[in-house]
Image: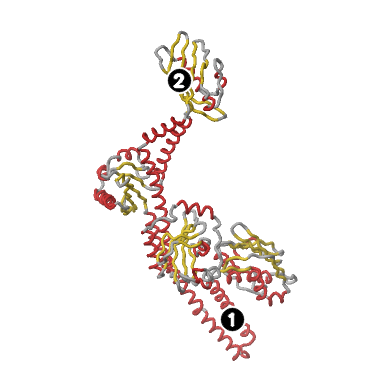
């Protein structure tokens, strides 16, 4: 058994999974319905929605399996999320090196067949799979695979919807708190005032502007932390006021007259480059040519910050509701609107008008058929009576075009008492159209595949039969009428035989090219051992030209073994074949590890390639030399291109004429 390795973006993947708040969540019928449908469609006893965290796979739904989680090390799905393709199929886990000793293969539930579609978000980050399992060898037809992928998409949509509902619930909870804002704010301020010390002071204001403190309590230094002198008219030199606040305070002093009995002021000090808010409250005592302020100074920085944060939270909540990509509305028990976000009604005037009104009022305003309003009222009443979420789809025709709106109503209760109804709506017109287009495209694909199958039959039978007849009659002519044909006749017959052989080779090569598909299982391959085998296979050619084939230490990777063997063999064979007659062929294979893949280089000292042919040499039947100079049918590099494409890599060439070529190709670390 080979344990799965962490995903290349494991940290981001886990963060995404946690954002759904779904791990260890309660039973959900929507997810169970999907696994039941998947098992029915794929004709398997087991279907799972598997989510992978750091150390385990947890099943949101487990149809046909009693357990709800397993260690991640035994997880087939942990291999699936590292698979480059959307779908991982294991036809017989007992024959796969990754799984054959797996406890879930050896013991219950005795997994043999596995097919898992990777669940991904919009950024292609995987977080789990929708998979089906059988205890015996099994396979899926193309239609079953298509439906399984569609169900996987539905799982992702359900999780996104659930996530949005949680976010909405949190936002609405804060909205509810906002309705109690005045009481909460009062409690917060009371708590702040209880815990904030107060500085008592006495301050003398003279008409000549010579003002000073005659008393200030010791707490001032603790609160602000500044030591102010007493009886010093330059007291203001010890405090750094926020710009304009000092001028505003002096203006307050100058505005005091005989009728003034109190003075209140809020301002800011700057202490150690931090802003400290203060509140001054005092009574005003008039004594001859002096004015005496007696009162307190408070540090109200925390209070200001609390109020500022409360404003920011309110703004944030409004922004969340207005920017959720869906129509959001709140209704009272009579189906009247309490709130509508901007996505629901973009016109501010109309949105404000709707508050306190209902769909019947809106439909009357717009001159619309009230039947749709009545339908919405019926769904509202259903959600209210059952106390359960209700989903439905509005089909709306506008300007000759039909739109589909998925709506959801969720009743919200506080301590058993109805508070409000949450309305949620998303335009799914594009999704419906995409599903219809997908059905059309699938049918086109089925037709194309049928055409390809017919072509394969014609190529393998109908085209080759006439060629075999030509070759047979050619041999008969040569055997029975050789002496009667004369020189020209023998020459023409030789041309016919060679042309027929070339045609047969081309058809055979084309058939081989068409057979390169992902039908082989991925396996781990030591490229060093592979090179030894390829070198042995090419020993006749190597010995004939006294060629040197060497390689540096190569990696061990997951790949399609047979195809990679063909790739390496073709590149080495070309390196030996396309060499000048007076040159000993030398081919060197090397590799370089990169972040996401391995880069391989196959370097030779052959005749080289003109730069203008760098791209088209990978086209099928593309030859740069005639048959007399270098044999072949021009399909070897096309094979190489197709093999690397199947692996999800790239292949290209760098070459200088008469100096040799280097063919580069990449193989991803995670196929």
Q: Quadrant of residue 482?
A: bottom right
Q: How is the image coloured?
A: secondary structure
The circle drawn on residue 496 is 1
**385 sits to left or right of 25:** left
Residue that carries the numbered disc 2 in the rendered image: 295
Task: Check the picture and name the quadrant holding the N terminus.
Answer: bottom right
Structural crowding at the residue carrying mark 1, measured as other residues with C-alpha within 10 Å and reported as few (<14), some (14–19) or many (≥20):
some
- Residue 558 position, x and y percent, is 58, 66
User: Can residue 156 be seen here?
Assistant: yes
Structural crowding at the residue carrying mark 2, measured as other residues with C-alpha within 10 Å and reported as few (<14), some (14–19) or many (≥20):
many
Q: Mark 1 touching mark 2, by CB under 8 A?
A: no
Up the image or down, 337 lies above or below 262; here it is below
Looking at the image, the residue that sits furthest to the front is 218
User: Can residue 393 be seen here?
Assistant: no
Point out the frontmost of discs 1 and 2.
2
- Residue 325 position, x and y percent, is 40, 47
């Amino acid at each position: 058994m080979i344990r799965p390795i962490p995903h290349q973006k494991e940290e981001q993947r886990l963060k995404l999974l946690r954002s759904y708040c779904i791990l260890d969540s309660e039973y959900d019928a929507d997810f169970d319905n999907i696994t039941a449908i998947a098992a029915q469609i794929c004709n398997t006893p087991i279907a799972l929605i598997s989510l992978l965290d750091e150390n385990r796979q947890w099943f949101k739904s487990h149809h046909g399996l009693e357990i709800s989680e397993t260690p991640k090390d035994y997880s087939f799905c942990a291999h699936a999320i590292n698979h480059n393709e959307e779908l991982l199929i294991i036809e017989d886990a007992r024959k796969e090196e990754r799984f054959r000793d797996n406890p879930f293969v050896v013991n219950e539930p005795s997994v043999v067949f596995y097919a898992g579609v990777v669940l991904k978000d919009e950024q292609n980050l995987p977080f789990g799979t929708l998979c089906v399992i059988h205890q015996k060898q099994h396979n899926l037809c193309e239609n079953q695979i298509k439906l399984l992928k569609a169900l996987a998409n539905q799982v992702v949509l359900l999780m996104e919807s659930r996530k949005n509902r949680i976010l909405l619930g949190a936002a609405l909870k804060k909205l509810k708190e906002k309705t109690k804002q005045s009481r909460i704010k009062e409690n917060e301020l009371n708590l702040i005032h209880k815990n904030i010390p107060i500085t008592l002071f006495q301050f003398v204001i003279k008409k000549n502007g010579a003002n000073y403190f005659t008393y200030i309590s010791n707490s001032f230094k603790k609160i602000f932390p500044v030591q102010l002198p007493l009886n010093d008219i330059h007291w203001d030199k010890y405090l750094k006021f926020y710009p304009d606040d000092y001028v505003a305070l002096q203006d307050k002093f100058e505005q005091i007259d005989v009728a003034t009995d109190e003075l209140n002021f809020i301002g800011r000090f700057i202490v150690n480059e931090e802003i400290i808010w203060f509140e001054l409250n005092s009574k005003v005592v008039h004594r001859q040519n002096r004015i005496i302020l007696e009162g307190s100074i408070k540090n109200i920085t925390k209070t200001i910050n609390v109020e500022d944060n409360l404003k920011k939270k309110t703004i944030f909540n409004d922004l969340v509701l207005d920017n959720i990509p869906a129509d959001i509305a709140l209704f009272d028990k009579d189906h009247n609107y309490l709130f509508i976000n901007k996505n629901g009604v973009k016109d501010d005037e109309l949105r404000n008008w709707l508050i306190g009104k209902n769909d019947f009022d809106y439909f009357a305003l717009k001159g619309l058929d009230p039947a749709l309003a009545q339908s919405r009222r019926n769904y509202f009443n259903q959600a209210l009576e059952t106390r359960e979420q209700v989903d439905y789809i509005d089909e709306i025709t506008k300007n000759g075009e039909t739109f589909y709106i998925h709506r959801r109503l969720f009743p919200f209760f506080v301590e058993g008492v109805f508070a409000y109804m949450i309305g949620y709506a998303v335009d799914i017109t594009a999704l419906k159209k995409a599903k219809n287009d997908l059905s059309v495209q699938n049918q086109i694909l089925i037709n194309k595949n049928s055409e390809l199958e017919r072509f394969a039959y014609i190529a393998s039978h109908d085209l080759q039969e006439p060629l075999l007849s030509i070759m047979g009659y050619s041999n008969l002519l040569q055997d029975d009428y050789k002496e009667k044909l004369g020189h020209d006749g023998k020459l023409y017959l030789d041309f016919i035989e060679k042309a027929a052989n070339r045609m047969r080779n081309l058809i055979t090569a084309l058939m081989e090219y068409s057979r390169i598909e992902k039908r082989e299982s991925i396996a781990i391959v030591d490229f060093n051992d592979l090179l030894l085998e390829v070198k042995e296979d090419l020993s006749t050619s190597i010995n004939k030209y006294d060629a040197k084939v060497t390689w540096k230490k190569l990696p061990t990777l997951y790949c399609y073994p047979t195809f990679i063997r063909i790739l390496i063999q073709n590149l080495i064979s070309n390196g030996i074949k396309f060499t000048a007659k007076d040159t000993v062929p030398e081919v060197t294979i090397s590799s370089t590890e990169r972040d996401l893949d391995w880069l391989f280089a196959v370097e030779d000292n052959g005749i080289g390639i003109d730069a203008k042919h760098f791209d088209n040499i990978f086209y099928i039947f593309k030859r740069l030399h005639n048959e007399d100079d270098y044999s072949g049918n021009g399909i070897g590099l096309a094979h190489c291109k197709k093999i690397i494409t199947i692996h999800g890599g790239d292949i290209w060439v760098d070459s200088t004429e008469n100096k040799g070529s280097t063919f580069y190709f990449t193989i991803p670390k995670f196929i």
